[in-house]
Image (cartoon, rainbow, N blue to C red):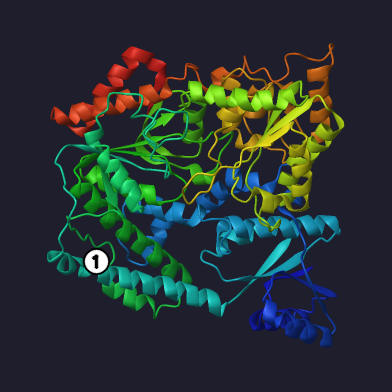
Amino acid sequence: MLILEKINISNLIKSLTLIIFKKKKFKTIYYIYDITKLNYIYKNIFRLLGFELSKLDFKMIEIRETNKECVNFSIPRKKLFELESIINIEYELTKYNLYQNQSIKDFILKSIFAEDYLKKNSPFRIIYLLDVISFFMNKYNVKDSTFILTNYPFFYLYTKYANEKGISIDKTYSFYFGLSINFLLSKSIIKKIYFKYLYLLKKNHTFNDKITHEIKLYCEGKSQPNLLNDGNRSDFFWLLNSNFSKKNVLYNSNDKNVVNFLKKNQINATLDFNSTFFYNYKFIPLVNLFKSFFNNKINYHYIISILNNYEYFYNKWYNYLKTHNVKISLCWYKYDSQHIVMNKALNNLGGISCFYQMNFDGHEYYESKLYTDINFCFSKFSATLDKKINSKIKHQIITGYPMIKITENMKSYANKIRNKLLNNGAEKIVCILDENSLSDERWHTGHNLQRENYSAIINELLKNNKLGVIFKPKSAYDIRDRLGKYEDLLNKAISTGRCFIYENVEQNKSKFTKATPIQAALSSDLIIHSHLSAGTAAIECAKLQIPTILLDRENDINSVMHKYVEKKNIFYNWDSIINELNSFFFDDNGDKNLGNWENSLKYFDPFNDNNASQRIGIFLDNLKIGFENGLTKEDNINLSIKKYRENWGNDKVISS
């Protein structure tokens, strides 16, 4: 097989070179990416030369390991770590005489290997494409193939993996990729010049915010600045359940209305990271950036652009944290490299970086690598997993899962929905939790997998007048568009009066469904989480002692869910779920313990008392008090940990 990454002149010439000079014989030449306007021309050129040009048609859900695990799990679980072990970033920095420290090395590695898989040059995407080619080689019983691939940074990383699959990689040079690299370098130069003259620009600028000198905790938001303990999501869940003072909290938003709202409620808020302090630390001289334009080494270009990002983010965070006297940070987003720089800036200011675990990971994910002083995690398993992926965390504080507070209003609304379905004939109600999806099934498991979550149970509802269904989409914003022709089926189900879907969305850029999984679960007799790999919501519902089962069509076999959750609660297709559901609900001889997690929850939350938010808030308050009393960073951490151990046990703190 001959596979082109994309159709262009360079790859056309490369193909002919292989065919003519290396005497490779191909009847059909496959390609991955289109260049729509020129496809017709290129196809005709190849046809005149006696070759058919055909697009490689594949779906992510079909690309699996020999154990049937989807490769979109095995790549971040294993293969990205293997690639990282090959690269010697210290050698690369030394070779190009570039500034280096451990923080910079960590930042560069995570910038490379945690790159969004939707980007064509990301290691995830390239390894995935090699797995795709291997899939077709096995399908058509082909022993070897050639893949013509753009000369991406650190190209050598992929040759060994490709050879193991029987794939020969030939590199080609892309004008557009080279242009994109130069564009990144141009942006880097602009950023450098901007910071060089920022002080002059700010000299005559009047800063309107009143800056207080109290010690601050910077709270990283998820655009959920809810200040009520009302059962809705809130970035301040820890604040609402502790005595931490509002005047010591700092929050940033790009929404003026949010900033004004928080200020009216005595919380320090900034718009777009406003700061008055100006510090411009130079990790890379401007002259080196200009020189890089005349250096044709792509690895050098790539490292320079990453290193410049490090410099930009370091100065941004240092100035912001210094301006507002931030001594503690509480963040959650660990999935890219920026938090590494922020933690470095805060540590250089004598502060303490803290993270809290937002999502449950059932196994290793490269993008989850975390670098922080303190991490508030769900359980010992989560702490152990962080160690396995080589996170650099000084202290793991086991707090349990921070559940939202269940209010009387939540219960009342849940009963209202439940009674509506019961009054229309339902006797038992099942709640379906789905996931998000993308339209292009090559790069995501796709809309069809989500459509099955709706069509399978709706078809059963239309046959069984005793069944009621509640849908809680992860993203209600576009769920009807993603359902396509199945939207009519959903409307038909709703018209029976036995089906309800939560469709209100959060008023922020995420557009996720406003209702929480807990809200939907409170109306239900059984919860079906349609994706075992994203099990956070399943844990939430199981903690409420509502029967909860998991669907694992992607065969995420390495997830700890398969180890700790009873096998009877895990299913692999909708047919088996519906059979068991009917037996559970309507057969006197059915297994009435279906969905019981009684023996499992201790592995995910050793407390199971719904007081994790309070524990986090109290710990943060102790850190604040320690700084107010003049303690050094290390003495402050040690004292706060000592108090936590006394209250919750020595086994609830794991220090490296």
Res 66 visible:
no
- Whether residue 211 sits left or right of residue 272 in the image: it is left
Q: Image quadrant for the C terminus?
A: top left
Q: Image quadrant for the N terminus?
A: bottom right
Q: Three-letter amino acid code at disc 1?
A: Phe
* Image location (x, y in percent) of residue 638: 26, 25
Are there few (<14), some (14-19), or many (20+) residues within 10 Å of tag 1? many
* Image location (x, y in percent) of residue 417: 64, 28
Residue 273 position (above or below residue 296): above
Is label 1 in a helix, a strand or a loop? helix
> Residue at horizontal 77%, vertical 55%?
135
> Residue at horizontal 16%, vertical 48%?
210
> Residue at horizontal 21%, vertical 69%?
196
Residue 169 position (above or below residue 628): below
* Image location (x, y in percent) of residue 391: 44, 39
471 and 6: which one is in front? 471
Q: How many marks?
A: 1
- Whether residue 156 sits left or right of residue 633 in the image: it is right
Residue 315 picture quarter: bottom left
Residue 88 position (above or below residue 264): below
> Residue at horizontal 34%, vertical 49%?
257
Res 43 visible:
yes
Residue 334 picture quarter: top left
Residue 37 picture quarter: bottom right
Badge 1 is on which residue? 195
- Whether residue 67 sits left or right of residue 242 in the image: it is right
Residue 642 position (above or below residue 324): above
* Image location (x, y in percent) of residue 331: 37, 40
623 and 344: which one is in front? 623
